[in-house]
Amino acid sequence: MDPMQTPVDHDVVIIGSGFSGIGMAIALQRSGRSFTVLEKAHDIGGTWRDNLYPGCACDVPSHLYSFSFEPNPYWSRAYATADEIQDYLLYVVEKYDVRKDVQFDAQVTRGVYDESLRVWHLTVLGSDGVETHLVAGAVVLGVGALHEPSLPDIPGLETFAGEVMHTASWDPGASMFGRKVGIIGTGASAVQAIPLLAEDADHLTVFQRTPAWVLPKVDPEYPDALQDAYDKRPWLMKLHRAKIRTANELRAIAFTRVPALLKAASAGAAANIRRSVTDPELRRKLIPDYTMGCKRITFSNAYYPALAREDVDVETEHITGADARGLVTADGARHDLDVLVLATGFDVAGSYRHLNFTGARGHDLGEDWDAGITSYYGVTVPHFPNLFFLLGPNTALGHTSVLMMIEAQIALTLRLLDERDRRRAGAVQVREAVAQAHMAALDRRTQRTVWIAGGCDSWYLDQFGRNRVLWPGSVPEYERATRRTEMVDYEFTGSRASVSSSR
Ligand code: NAP
């Protein structure tokens, strides 16, 4: 078929309606392109719709964890809770009228790039079990990497008679009152959930493999008068945002260039743990032996007091199995439980593998990435033309708001689409050699970061010990680099398919 005559349903299909997908939708709406958003759930949102565990909040200040084009004077406190962030996203969706462009209960189960027509064929599964097909001139993945729950491989877990809940698939109706609760994990999600679980449960056992560095949280409420001031004087709010942005960026220096600063700060943080926990045995369990920042630093004033409660135990023995009554640890101890909470994080590679994307010349995204993730600024991937990632590899952050990264990636995606169309080309993809050189440069830079030098094992590192999750620099540097990326780094090929009216 002549590519010029290929009917595509949409110029762009966005997968996911979290911050990435909605930000992209608004940008496409402004640019006048035809697009649709496919959302596998029944409502808008991603992280902040799904993570309903008690205590869920963002540890990035809200005035920075919002779109730059849609500041919100009404944040109620420095660090908003999950539901306040979700309300903000819903407000943005209504204000920009993008709900009509979202297809709900639409799970993409397959994506195949058609090399002759230079389009993507997407298979979409509805909640009614019916499969439909879409043809897209380009696909934007707004699915994120922290999305598929990672489940621990515990022998016998399927025989446990109590309730099992992952923090990212929480039943909001679940009650912990009067129940014996166990929680596996002490990462960012667990640190937020544990204080509230401890309050409600009859007894809480925290199964800790590696302790987290938990710092005090300064989280003031914003009084009405301040919210009014931000509303009436937007420059004041902008100033506040700029202040937070600058302060957070200073942290990037410690993470990416001078981990010795974090080593020194670790001593102060350890002193804080000693002050908060009087039991020497518990202290010994809770003070990490790796440098702060090697894993995500978490913030809570309630975490250590919760662990010090009489009705809370911290179990550091390895979990060896489960049976109908609960968990068994390596020392042979039995831990009877009514509820087991899995705060065990996410399957980063699986988040993309489940999409089943096949690019040019039969390249399978999952298989390619099993052999080693390659991308260019986390947005484009060799052999996957007309495919764009938001918050893709090496673009997560440990020091500040990822929304700034998302906005830079949206801008780059639009620039590439515009350039493709200006050249009347059918496809744009990054040159493989360019992406490989980029990854090699990232690897060199990552060597001096705390993620490598900090002495821990984390999900930031792949099976080869290379960081494939975090951006090893500052946000301004990423913004500059993506703004200046040269078009010569990309291949523009073929001629353009025509867009039929949206079905
Ligand atoms: P996580 O950081 O991956 O933590 C998972 C925890 O479970 C770790 O303590 C891990 O121990 C433990 N674990 C995993 N598998 C285990 C097993 N088989 N047996 C025993 N322990 C096991 O997951 P998360 O806390 O859900 O956080 C994930 C990410 O989400 C964060 O890094 C952050 O990017 C994001 N997040 C952000 C916020 C926020 O406020 N912005 C809040 C929550 C989450 P090891 O350390 O030994 O592996």
Image (cartoon, rainbow, N blue to C red):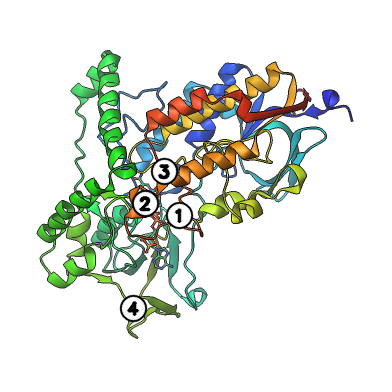
Q: Earlier in the sequence, mark 3 or mark 2?
A: 3
The amino acid pointed to by label 1 is Leu
The amino acid pointed to by label 3 is Arg
4 or 3: mark nearer the eye? 3
Q: Earlier in the sequence, mark 2 or mark 4?
A: 4
Real-space CA distance between mark 1 and mark 4, rounded to the nearest whole angstrom: 32 Å
For label 4, the crowd category at 10 Å Cα-Cα, with few meaning under 14, some 14 to 19 and many 20 or more, is some
Real-space CA distance between mark 2 and mark 1, rounded to the nearest whole angstrom: 8 Å
Q: Earlier in the sequence, mark 3 or mark 1?
A: 3
Q: Earlier in the sequence, mark 1 or mark 4?
A: 4
The amino acid pointed to by label 4 is His
73 vs 278, left or right, is right
Q: Residue at label 3?
A: 445
Ligand 1, seen in the image, is in the quarter at bottom left
Q: Residue at label 1?
A: 461
Real-space CA distance between mark 2 and mark 4, rounded to the nearest whole angstrom: 34 Å
Task: Give above or below for 315 relative to 5.
Answer: below
Q: Residue at label 2?
A: 451
Secondary structure of the residue carrying tag 4 is strand
Q: Quadrant of the C terminus?
A: top right
Q: Quadrant of the N terminus?
A: top right
Of residue 244 and residue 300, the one placed in the foreground of this image is 244
Real-space CA distance between mark 3 and mark 1, rounded to the nearest whole angstrom: 14 Å
Real-space CA distance between mark 4 and mark 3, rounded to the nearest whole angstrom: 44 Å
Q: Residue at label 4?
A: 335
Of residue 474 and residue 222, the one placed in the foreground of this image is 474
Q: Earlier in the sequence, mark 2 or mark 1?
A: 2
166 vs 229, left or right, is right
